[in-house]
Amino acid sequence: MDILDKIVAHKRQEVAARKEKYPVKLLEDSIYFETPTVSLSAYLKRPDKHGIIAEFKRRSPSKGDINPYAKVEEVSIGYMQAGASALSVLTDEQFFGGKSSDLTEARKFNYCPILRKDFIIDEYQILEARSIGADAILLIAACLSKEELHRLAQFARNLGLEVLVELHGANELDKLSPLANVVGVNNRDLQTFEVSISHSIQLFPQLPAEMVKISESGLNDPQAVVELRRVGFEGFLIGEYFMRAERPGQRCREFIQHIHRLEQLLDGAIA
């Protein structure tokens, strides 16, 4: 059993326990449940931004602790002041040290799209996402069948949430639901765990033209983001690189400024 299988198995137990503890009616009573959402896809296409989805992430199963004592308020506000297009908040506790209240806290201090980053396998988790203040959810193709992914995407859209579908390879393209607003390519090979942006570049021509496209994992070089932007990607999910810094917001600001300078140089050279 690989790490993804372990996470999904644990998630099934976790969701069953949460259903008993927090009935759906309790989720629907949240002040956020009927609040209008902010469009992730629209923000990623804004010409005054660079498509950075800055992630709040305390740890990971492969890397261990990244920034276990980080404060959501400080980091999320720092990301927004740095010019990020959106926030991603990991809410998985067992493997990533996150919690639902992290996302709610980020929502209190920021008017921007917030992605709930978790391993969603059940409609109940989508109701949770709506109740804690999320604007979009992540559906990972490797965790779901084609039918499951489409059903969950439909459920999310009915609740007013946008959907990001994450792919690891061309073999998962047939799972991609037309209801997805954003499609992401994870640059990490699930077999070797090696990371390369060539993974995103190679898959780009096969992605649906109508969907906003993002690249995920292993992005720590502004030059790589510039290259991906030239290919046509509009969003870039970055967590670990920012979170390893003492001041994640400052590192995000410097990263975005570097992208801007590189693109100015390229545009000048072309002109």
Image (cartoon, grey):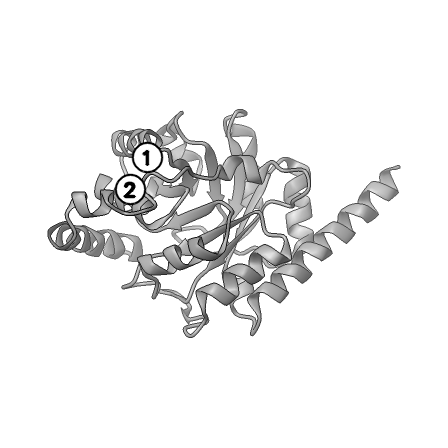
Place of residue 79 in the rendered image (x, y in percent of width and height, measured from the top left): 57, 58
Question: 138 or 132, which is in the foreground?
Answer: 132
Q: Amino acid at mark 2?
A: Ile
Question: 172 or 241, which is in the foreground?
Answer: 241
Question: 155 or 194, which is in the foreground?
Answer: 155
- Label 2 belongs to which residue? 126
Place of residue 18 in the rendered image (x, y in percent of width and height, measured from the top left): 17, 54
Which of disc 2 and disc 1 is earlier in sequence?
A: 2
Camera sees residue 51: yes
Instruction: Give the quarter of the image for residue 162.
Output: top left
> Height in image: 171 above or below 61?
above
- Label 1 belongs to which residue? 156
The residue that appears at 38% across and 52% down in the rendered structure is: 191
- Image-based side of 77 in relation to 173, left or right: right
Place of residue 6 in the rendered image (x, y in percent of width and height, measured from the top left): 24, 57
- Image-based side of 56 in relation to 5, left or right: right
The residue that appears at 38% across and 43% down in the rendered structure is: 138
Circles 1, 2 touching at the beta carbon (< 8 Å): yes
Q: Residues within 10 Å of mark 1 (few under 14, many from 20)?
A: many
Numbered tag placed on residue 264 in the rendering: none
Q: Amino acid at mark 1?
A: Ala
Image quadrant occupied by the C terminus? top right
